[in-house]
């Protein structure tokens, strides 16, 4: 496919004002991060001006409608910017993530006793300013092809939610100190495939393979091959007496669906973090599967290497 029209999606702008009590070293670090990101954006724009493509730049804050009529989305920021793009994309347009502010190991070590000096992780970003032109040329010349990442489809009472999760979803009480009550079972071809589990806990997390190295891994889950079509689920902090440990954590295979019945007065489905969420109530039935359209992403070489192992 010939790439002619590009959308440059920029990391959402944030208020630059810092609290008056911010430590000078921290303030200097934050200002430097803002400066490095701005320089990266300018660099990428200069590269694009040399190419035979049409492009326009849009701040993430200003993008609310589905992305259409472009051949490629270039998300400059980090994984958060790529996630933002994914929520407005179908399975036709590919996305390239550019990590505009990579973490510097020497900097993390230098400030380890003062504050967290980690910058952008950029786990799914195939480019930085160091290799942006090289990667872009590979895409424009059809030498580099995108991978298809599984996303999560969520339905509530048989109505599909409009947003697909690229990383994970969390189903929980809106108050983190409150108990979440729900039951779930795995179905296959619309037939029960596992016993019904009724549970009290702090919620239910379900991740894709792409999201299995994020919150799921931090909670004790396991990393999955990046191109796996399966989903991983984990009941968070189960407290029900006699809860079987082997039913609290497992896989929803590519041909299976998890049916969950919510049993609290209030609940929320959080998609890829806290910014996108949907309220649920007692008795709502939530269906979770991998039946969402996949997302075409140009992945970094190290992730592609792991996928082939």
Image (cartoon, rainbow, N blue to C red):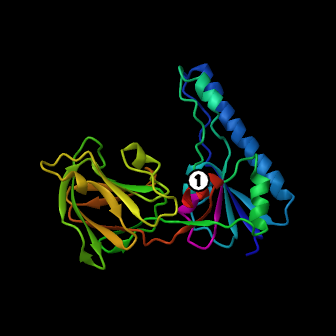
Provide the residue span drawn in magenta: 84-97
- Magenta stretch encompasses residue 90: yes
Kindly give the residue lying farthest to the front in the view shown.
Answer: 309
Is 36 contained in the magenta span? no
Task: Assign the C terminus to one quadrant of the image.
Answer: bottom right
Q: Is residue 270 among the parts visible in the rendering?
A: no
Q: Which residue is under mark 1?
A: 124
Mark 1 is surrounded, within 10 Å at the Cα level, by few (under 14), some (14 to 19) or many (20 or more) other residues, namely many
- Quadrant in which the N terminus appears: bottom right
Observer able to see residue 233:
yes
Taking the image as shown, residue 136 lies to the left or right of residue 182, namely right
How far from the left and from the top, in percent, is residue 297?
Answer: 61, 62
Q: Tell me what residue is drawn at x 49 percent, y 65 percent.
A: 150
Image-quadrant location for residue 138 = bottom right
Q: Is residue 258 left or right of residue 131?
A: left
15 sits left or right of 291 in the view: right
* Residue, far left: 241
Residue 128 x/y as whole percent: 71, 48
């Amino acid at each position: 496919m010939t790439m002619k029209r590009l959308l440059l999606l920029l990391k959402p702008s944030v208020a630059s004002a810092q609290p008056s009590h911010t430590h000078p070293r921290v303030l200097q670090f934050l200002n430097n991060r803002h400066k490095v990101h701005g320089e990266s954006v300018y660099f990428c724009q200069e590269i694009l001006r040399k190419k035979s493509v049409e492009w326009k730049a849009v701040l993430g804050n200003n993008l609310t409608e589905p992305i259409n009529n472009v051949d490629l989305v270039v998300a400059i920021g980090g994984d958060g910017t790529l996630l933002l793009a994914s929520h407005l994309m179908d399975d036709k347009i590919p996305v390239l993530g550019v990590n505009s502010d990579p973490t510097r190991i020497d900097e993390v070590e230098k400030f380890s006793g003062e504050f967290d000096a980690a910058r952008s992780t950029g786990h799914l970003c195939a480019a930085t300013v160091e290799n942006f032109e090289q990667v872009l040329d590979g895409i424009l010349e059809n030498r580099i092809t995108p991978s298809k990442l599984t996303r999560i489809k969520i339905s509530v009472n048989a109505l599909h939610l409009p947003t697909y999760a690229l990383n994970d979803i969390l189903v929980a009480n809106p108050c983190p100190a409150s108990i979440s009550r729900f039951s779930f079972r795995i179905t296959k071809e619309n037939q029960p495939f596992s016993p019904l589990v009724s549970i009290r806990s702090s919620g239910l997390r379900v991740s894709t393979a792409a999201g299995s190295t994020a919150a799921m891994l931090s909670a004790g889950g396991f990393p999955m091959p990046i191109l796996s079509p399966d989903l991983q689920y984990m009941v968070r902090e189960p407290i029900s007496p006699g809860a079987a440990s082997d039913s609290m954590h497992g896989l929803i295979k590519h041909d299976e669906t998890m049916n969950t019945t919510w049993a609290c007065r209030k609940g929320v489905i959080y998609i890829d973090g806290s910014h996108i969420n949907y309220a649920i109530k007692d008795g709502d039935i939530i269906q979770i599967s991998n039946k969402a359209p996949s997302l075409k992403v140009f992945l970094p070489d190290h992730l592609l290497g792991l996928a082939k192992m």
